[in-house]
Amino acid sequence: MTTTAEAPTLVLPRVVDDPVVGLVERMRPQLGRPVDALQIAAALESDGLTDRSARDDYGHPDVFVLAEEVFRRLDPEIRPPAVPRAAPADPVRAARDLSHGLLYLMPGVLLPAVLAILAERSVVLALLIVGPLGWVWSGGTAWLAYRLVGRSQVRVAARLLRGSTLLGPAVGAAATAALAGSTRDDLPPVLLASGLLMYQAAATAALFYRREGWLLAAMAPAAAAGGAYLLTGRPDAPVAVIVAVGSVAVGFVLALGWTTRTDLPAWYARPATPPAELPLHRAVRPELPQLCAVLVYAALSAAYLLHSAARHLSGPVDLAVAAAPLVLGMGLVEWRVRRFHEHARELLRRAWSPRRFATGVWARLALELALATTAVAVLALPMFAPLRQAGLLSTAGTVLVAAHVAVAGAYFLAFVVAGHGRFGRLSAALAVALAAHLTVLLLVPGGSSPLVDAAAYLGSAVLLQAMLLAALAGVLGQAWRYR
């Protein structure tokens, strides 16, 4: 019996008429599930493909156009789902955002009445301690609480807010007492610091639970009493302070009530399968590395604004209130940041081209930056027109107001940068801007004069905007960040 060996089957190489088909097949294992053509362009460039090879080998003008073609040819099942349509403008949400400026400005309305019954040293000491401490404390707490909510640990976030609300005033009082001393004369700044942090804790809880209207209603009597004293100048400062103490106490009790809720907030999207509730220390542990970066950013942000305001607190009235339009307009800045992200997601839904999306999102950023800056400038006009008519608005005051308008634009960009998680770049930009202003104050002859100080602060704000725009250059047009 004989056997005949079968001839081996020859497998001819596959001939690809369209070189892009071969590229798609070759790159498919490396691409996984790309979210947009920009991700494919990055993969092609890391694979060594250049604009010249895109033209010579694949017949496309550059890598980006070739990436769009590869993205188009991928199988539908591995392409990402369509971006959902952005939610329409919500006037209630906009009103809540705008009300934040009133909440931030509320302590400033009461400041003249407090200065009328307390020594200036006590007030300045309390503000210098509470300002940076409260900014960092509330900023870190709010960021951490929202991170926990994003992981569906809502009740853990409530416990965090409750502990922060109770502990913050005690920490502020202790820090002020340590710096002020322990005599009876040093009791007023301790009490003032504690009261200010009680209000800041209440404001943090109100923003988290979207109860701004309740806190504004609680503080309305205090605002009315402080405003009446500011306008009339009558010797009823103690009445205004007593009313303010009562309003802060009511707001603090409301905040504690919000943080003891056992049900989920109405604005929270309930997951289909809620995760197991973790102990606070375990829930917080994964967030600690980035929390440190957030705290550094909050500290530098507070230092950049407050170091200038503190210098003029006891100076001429136009310099002392130069930051008021910025504080009142911060809610408007927050609103425009939110609208920018909403418009970016809508633009992503309509434009699949990476270049069209990048161009559109940068144009939208420029528009929103202009709107936010212009709105804060418009707020300043009626606030400082009476001072100008009374001859109390100096050239230095005008420049310092313009500087704070520029700072509003810088904070708009800072919120956008923070939304992309670039806290390192953000902190570095704030540190450079702060150092630039301090350098003028300390080293330039005449730098401590009000006009030179205001001009230097304006220059540092413009510098800060430029650095923040540079920090956004590599990330703003990346479509995957808006999905």
Image (cartoon, grey):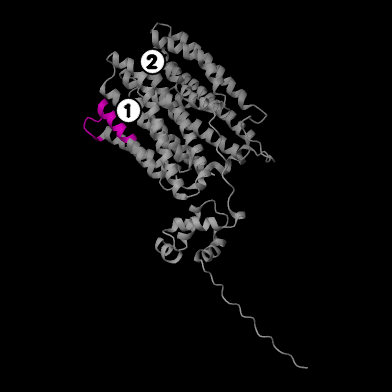
Q: Which residues are magenta?
A: 443-461
Vertical arrangement, residue 361 with respect to residue 116, above or below: below
Q: Quadrant of residue 152?
A: top right
Q: Is residue 350 left or right of residue 321?
A: right
Q: Amino acid at mark 1?
A: Ala
Give the farthest residue toward the left: 445
Other residues around mark 1 within 10 Å, as few (<14) / some (14–19) / many (≥20) = many
Pick the residue in front: 398 or 63: 63
**Picture coordinates of residue 184, whole percent (x, y):** 45, 16
Give the farthest residue toward the right: 1
Pick the residue in front: 270 or 66: 66
Pick the residue in front: 74 or 152: 74
Q: CA distance from mark 2 to mark 1?
A: 31 Å
Kindly identify the residue that appears in the image at 42 percent across and 19 percent down: 108
Q: Is residue 279 left or right of residue 383?
A: right
Kindly identify the residue that appears in the image at 33 percent across and 25 percent down: 401
Other residues around mark 2 within 10 Å, as few (<14) / some (14–19) / many (≥20) = few
- Taken as a whole, is the magenta stretch helix, strand or loop? helix
Task: Give the mark count.
Answer: 2
Q: Quadrant of residue 449?
A: top left
User: Helix, strand or loop at disc 2?
Assistant: loop
**In the image, is residue 444 part of the stretch drawn in magenta?**
yes
Give the farthest residue toward the bottom: 1
Kindly identify the residue that appears in the image at 33 percent across and 15 percent down: 386
What residue does disc 2 label? 119
**Picture coordinates of residue 387, whole percent (x, y):** 31, 16
**In the image, is residue 283 part of the stretch drawn in magenta?**
no
**Picture coordinates of residue 460, whole percent (x, y):** 32, 35
Q: Earlier in the sequence, mark 2 or mark 1?
A: 2
Q: Amino acid at mark 2?
A: Ala
What residue does disc 1 label? 402
- State the mark number for residue 286: none
